[in-house]
Image (spheres, rainbow, N blue to C red):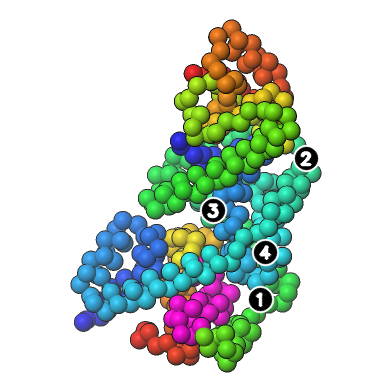
Amino acid sequence: MNTANNNERSEIEGLLPWHAAGTLGHRDTQRVEAALANDPELARRYELVREELAQTIHLNETLGAPSSRAMAALFAKIDAEPARNKATSIALGARIRAFFASLSPRTVAWSASAAALAILLQAGLIAGIMLKEKNVGGYEIASAPTNVGGDGAYALIRFEPQASAADIAAFLATNKLSISDGPSAGGLYRVRIAAAKLPKTDLDRIAKMLRENKVVGFVGITE
Amino acid sequence: MQTTSDEVLIGRIAGGDRLAMQVLFARHHVRIYRFVLRMVRNEATAEDLINEVFLDVWRQAEKFEGRSAASTWMLSIARFKALSVLRRRGEEELDDETAGAIEDHADDPEVTLAKKDKGAVLQQCLTKLSTEHREIIDLVYYHEKSVEEVAGIVGIPEATVKTRMFYARKKLSELLKAQGVDRGWP
């Protein structure tokens, strides 16, 4: 093997950890795969990398997680922070599009899984609050997956950015509402406002009443 | 159903949306906790640090420009804070030998048992690496960061990222060899 080939091999070998983790770009991935197919020693070393990857993941996964006090402490500090303006960056959308264009498929897949889990956790939190209320006050609970598209009357609601989880829970309980889906990309939640379908005049009246609550930023009636 | 991206959440957090903050926290706090825990090696300190990290996210969301992934940005903040703690503790000079000495229980029965399992030995050796080497191995293997992202988080050139990863792996092989596992590399 000449010097040029040695340099190429060293360079490829240096990329093996990222290849194993799935974070290489398309071009480098192709280079590594071609080299692995033609170089048994490199393929053997790649197996060592994969072993390291597996054990590093295993080690980190056994580290546990912070206690639930961490979240409570954080939000107590956030609640003590001064209120801020609701203005958001208009240029964000353009930046996000550019960002997504640069993501690898594995990153997108991981983000989607993590996001789904986070939303599930959030839905679980809200459902837990409402279940507690049902026990003491007789409110009806929506089962999120089965209620989507089922019977009942629904509204799309976006909560005010300043509204805390406690404010939202109180709003839902007071108005006997249940979140059945969301948030969508626009921050909208699909909320069941009645167990049976209602005439449009009733829906409009309820929507108008809900709009008057300070935790609500937007209310729209949906089928 | 399409879920909201981290970048959109940070945009909402910049506008004071506490619910968006809860979602972002739920998504990332465990990984960030593990990242700092591997650095500071103390659960209470790691828990305090993630609070500081997310409080910074709340305060600085407006400044986030989306040039890097949100997780990369948060890991950078976490790393800076963890290093500050290590510096306060006077552990920034901790080198490979010192780290090895702290965690080397080569002769105790638990370790002898663990030696029977190559995976367990490898994990044990991963804990013996220096802070610098542990950090890069975790960022690449566990946090799935590209060469460019690691360079951004650690603040070193991309070529140095590759070199550092090579030396971290080399050190790992040496530690394994000392434990009786010869990988035939490097």
The residue under label 2 is: A82
Q: Say if residue A155 shows up in the picture.
A: no
Share a chain, discs 3 and 2?
A: no
The numbered disc on residue B46 is 4
Q: Give the Cα distance between marks 4 and 1.
A: 17 Å
Q: Whole-percent x and y of residue B37?
A: 63, 67
Amino acid type for the residue under numbered disc 3: Ser
Which chain's residue wears label 2? A
Q: Residues within 10 Å of mark 2 (few under 14, many from 20)?
A: few
Q: Is residue B136 above or below residue B4?
A: below
Q: Secondary structure at mark 1?
A: loop
Q: Is residue B84 left or right of residue B23?
A: right
Q: Secondary structure at mark 2?
A: loop
Q: Say if residue A65 shows up in the picture.
A: yes
Q: Give the Cα distance between marks 3 and 4.
A: 17 Å
Q: Give the Cα distance between marks 4 and 2.
A: 26 Å
Q: Whole-percent x and y of residue B38?
A: 60, 69
Q: Quadrant of the N terminus of chain A?
A: bottom left
Q: Secondary structure at mark 3?
A: helix
Tell me which label, 3 or 4, sits earlier in the chain: 4
The residue under label 1 is: B92
The residue under label 3 is: B71
Q: Is residue B165 left or right of residue B110?
A: left
Which chain's residue wears label 3? B
Amino acid type for the residue under numbered disc 2: Pro
Q: Depth check: give the residue in front, B124 or A134.
A: A134
Query: Which stretch is magenta?
Result: B114-138
Tell me which label, 1 or 3, sits earlier in the chain: 3
Share a chain, discs 1 and 3?
A: yes
Q: Residue at x 60, y 63 (%)?
A: A64
Residue B136 is one of the magenta-drawn residues: yes
